Image (tube, rainbow, N blue to C red):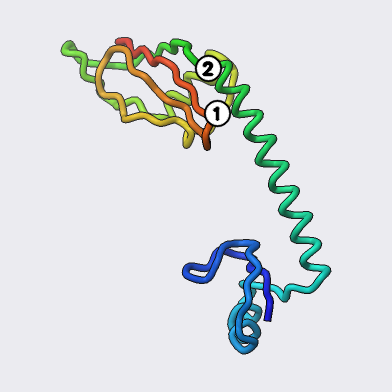
Amino acid sequence: MKVILITDIPKVGNKYDIKEFKEGYAQNVLIAKGLAILATPGELSKLADKKAQIERKKNEEMKNFESIISSVNNTSIEIRVKANEKGHLFKAVSPHDVKQAIKEISGVEIDENTIIMEHIKELGVHKVIIKKGTKSGSCEIIIKKD
């Protein structure tokens, strides 16, 4: 029996996969628990439309991300923090702090999950990579004492 998985199921398949299962397992487990629906021609056409919509949304998000990268790439962003005399920060600078600084300076909102960096614990200049999928850019973060 062919079914369409509507959630990710470990060791079985991913969301929107079309899988073939024995009728008892499909009816009594997957469909009964709301993990899958029967793969009828109508449901298959809905699935094709949904996949096309998801693909368009991904492409749009990538275009937006490319524009964000172009506006932030190779720029310097200054963050002022409290530190001791030796240059050690009282609180580490995290991707969330970098996200806020980028938003304040350039007005661009980015997802902090796309910022690749270690927590910064020292004053000075640090490189931060912004990456999503295959697209990436970088910027300098200048940590100065407040």
Residue 35, image x, y percentages: 61, 72
Task: Please report the residue visible at 40 percent of the width from the left and 31 percent of the height from the top.
Answer: 116
Q: Earlier in the sequence, mark 1 or mark 2?
A: 2
| Helix, strand or loop for disc 1 | loop
| Helix, strand or loop for disc 2 | helix
Q: Amino acid at mark 1?
A: Ile
In the picture as drawn, the residue positioned furthest to the bottom comes out as: 24
Task: Please report the residue visible at 76 percent of the width from the left and 57 percent of the height from the top.
Answer: 48
Task: Please report the residue visible at 53 percent of the width from the left and 68 percent of the height from the top.
Answer: 9
For this view, does 48 lie left or right of residue 139? right
Q: Amino acid at mark 2?
A: Val
- Tell me how many marks there are: 2
> Around disc 2, counting alpha carbons within 10 Å, would you say few (fewer than 14), some (14 to 19), or many (20 or more)?
many
Question: Could you tell me which quadrant the N terminus lies in?
Answer: bottom right
In the picture as drawn, the residue positioned furthest to the right comes out as: 42
Q: Which mark is residue 72?
A: 2
Residue 36, image x, y percentages: 65, 72
Q: Disc 1, disc 2: CB below 8 Å?
A: yes
- In the rendered view, tell whether residue 117 sits above or below residue 54: above
For this view, does 89 lie left or right of residue 24? left
- In the rendered view, tell whether residue 96 sits above or below residue 7: above
Residue 34, image x, y percentages: 64, 74
> Around disc 1, counting alpha carbons within 10 Å, would you say few (fewer than 14), some (14 to 19), or many (20 or more)?
some
**Disc 1: which residue:** 110
Residue 51, image x, y percentages: 71, 53
Q: Nearer the viewer, residue 49 or 101?
A: 49
